[in-house]
């Protein structure tokens, strides 16, 4: 990694920290709200531009498309998260999502920085990745994951504005537990694999079920104020729009993945665990879109479904390599 690339990447990481705190200030202080929002947005744009330059620089240095290992995919994920927020914020004028988008990018930056040096170094591609299908298949998937994360975060904000604080607390705890399982699976060899799998799957199932069951608890007996009701409706729409962008990208990624698999392994579908999980994730968002269009669930229940989709996306993206599920995609495992 050259000094220029390291500087650009570090700049993007630092701007994520800065935008996080600026957006937090904008939500806590009415006096500095407007000014903080503008500063936070411009800081996020600076981080996005820096990360774009860092990815391009890495590609030039590597003399290949810069998406070949976990570290590079995390850079792309952070890039898509920041870019997705910038687009959504300008389209809807909502900046409460800013601190969550900044926090997400920061967490993935930190996760990537903690990976072994072998992930940071530019090394020759493993044979399975020496194909033009890599830059056709993988980028749409990474962008779809980022959009699904933004949809899940919008769901959390919808619950906050709807005053479903018990459900919100349960879902936040669920995401933290699932993320903890991913982190332990990546960096800790002492915890048994089955314990990590149980932690992720168990917390996701229990948390989602409790989320649905507690939707009627912890909310005010009074009707929502017009401002909160309007804000909740906006976040519901933002979540749907993010899914509407991510879903066709995931569909394209699954189709091109099948074509690449046939080219590399002689079969369009091998029932590999990661392939199966991608299909489950696709079905969950197909159900979300159907339920949203048909208005068969309330916005609060759809928010829980969006958070469930976020957990499924996390499992598809990082879980199968870090939690030891194995399969044909195990070349992405770092240990």
Image: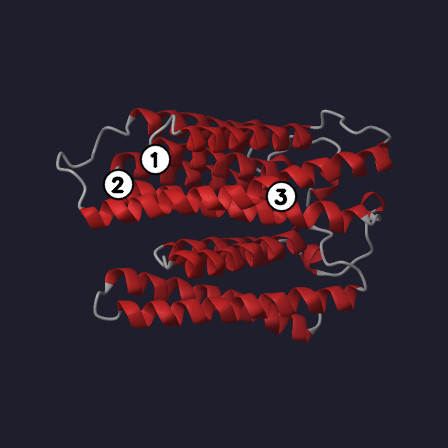
Q: Is residue 70 above or below residue 184?
A: below
Helix, strand or loop for disc 1: helix
The crowd level at tag 3 (other Cα within 10 Å; few <14, some 14-19, many 20+) is many
Q: Mark 1 near mark 3, Cβ–Cβ under 8 Å? A: no
Spatial CA span between label 3 and label 2: 30 Å
Residue 310 % position (x, y)? 49, 39
> Regarding mark 2 in the picture, which secondary structure is present there?
loop
Q: Residue 125 carries which label?
A: none
Q: Name the residue under label 3.
A: 249
Q: Which of marks 2 and 1 is nearer the N terminus?
A: 2
Query: How far apart in space, not on screen, are marks 2 and 1 (Cα)?
Result: 9 Å
Could you say whether the residue bearing mark 3 is in a helix, strand or loop? helix
- Give the x, y percent position of residue 38: 37, 70
Percent coordinates x, y for residue 306 in the rendering? 44, 36
Given residues 10 and 40, the one toward you in this image is: 40
Q: Which residue is drawn at 71% across and 43% down?
A: 332
Where is 241 relative to 10, above or below?
above
Sequence-earlier tag: 3 or 2: 2
| Left or right: 121 in relation to 249 | right
Give the alpha-carbon distance from disc 1 to disc 3, as whole Å. Answer: 24 Å
At x 47% / y 48%, what residue is drawn? 150
Residue closest to the far front? 294
Residue 129 pos. (x, y %): 80, 46
Q: Name the residue under label 1.
A: 299
The residue under the point 42% across, 59% down is 89
> Between 91 and 321, which is closer to the camera in this rendering?
91
Work out whether residue 193 can be spotted: yes
**Left or right: 222 in relation to 132:** left
Q: Quadrant of residue 96?
A: bottom left
Residue to which mark 2 is pinned: 162
- Contact? badges 2 and 1 (CB < 8 Å): yes
Residue lying at 33% horizontally and 31% vertically, measured from the top left:
298
């Amino acid at each position: 990694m050259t000094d220029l690339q390291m500087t650009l990447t570090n700049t993007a990481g630092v701007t994520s920290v800065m935008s996080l705190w600026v957006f937090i200030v904008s939500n806590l202080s009415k006096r500095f709200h407007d000014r903080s929002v503008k500063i936070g947005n411009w800081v996020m744009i600076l981080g996005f531009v820096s990360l774009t330059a860092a990815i391009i620089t890495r590609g030039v240095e590597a003399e290949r498309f810069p998406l070949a290992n976990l570290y590079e995919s995390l850079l792309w994920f952070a890039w898509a998260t920041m870019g997705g927020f910038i687009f959504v914020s300008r389209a809807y004028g909502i900046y409460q999502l800013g601190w969550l988008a900044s926090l997400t990018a920061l967490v993935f930056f930190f996760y990537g920085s903690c990976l072994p040096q072998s992930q940071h170094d530019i090394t020759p591609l493993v044979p399975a990745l020496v194909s033009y299908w890599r830059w056709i298949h993988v980028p749409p998937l990474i962008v779809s994951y980022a959009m699904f994360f933004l949809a899940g975060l919008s769901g959390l904000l919808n619950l906050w504005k709807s005053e479903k604080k018990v459900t919100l607390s349960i879902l936040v705890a669920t995401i933290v537990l699932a993320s903890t399982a991913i982190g332990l699976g990546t960096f800790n060899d002492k915890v048994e694999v089955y314990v990590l799998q149980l932690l992720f799957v168990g917390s996701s199932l229990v948390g989602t079920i409790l989320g649905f069951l507690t939707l009627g608890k912890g909310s005010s007996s009074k009707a929502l104020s017009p401002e909160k009701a309007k804000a909740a409706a906006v976040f519901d729409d933002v979540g749907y729009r993010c899914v509407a962008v991510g879903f066709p990208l995931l569909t394209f990624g699954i189709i091109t993945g099948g074509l690449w698999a046939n080219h590399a392994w002689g079969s369009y579908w091998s029932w590999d665990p990661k392939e199966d999980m991608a299909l489950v994730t696709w079905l969950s968002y197909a159900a979300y879109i159907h339920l949203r269009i048909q208005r068969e669930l309330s916005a609060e229940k759809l928010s829980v479904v969006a958070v469930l989709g976020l957990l499924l996306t996390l499992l598809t993206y990082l879980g199968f390599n870090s939690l030891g599920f194995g399969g044909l995609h195990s070349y992405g495992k770092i240990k």
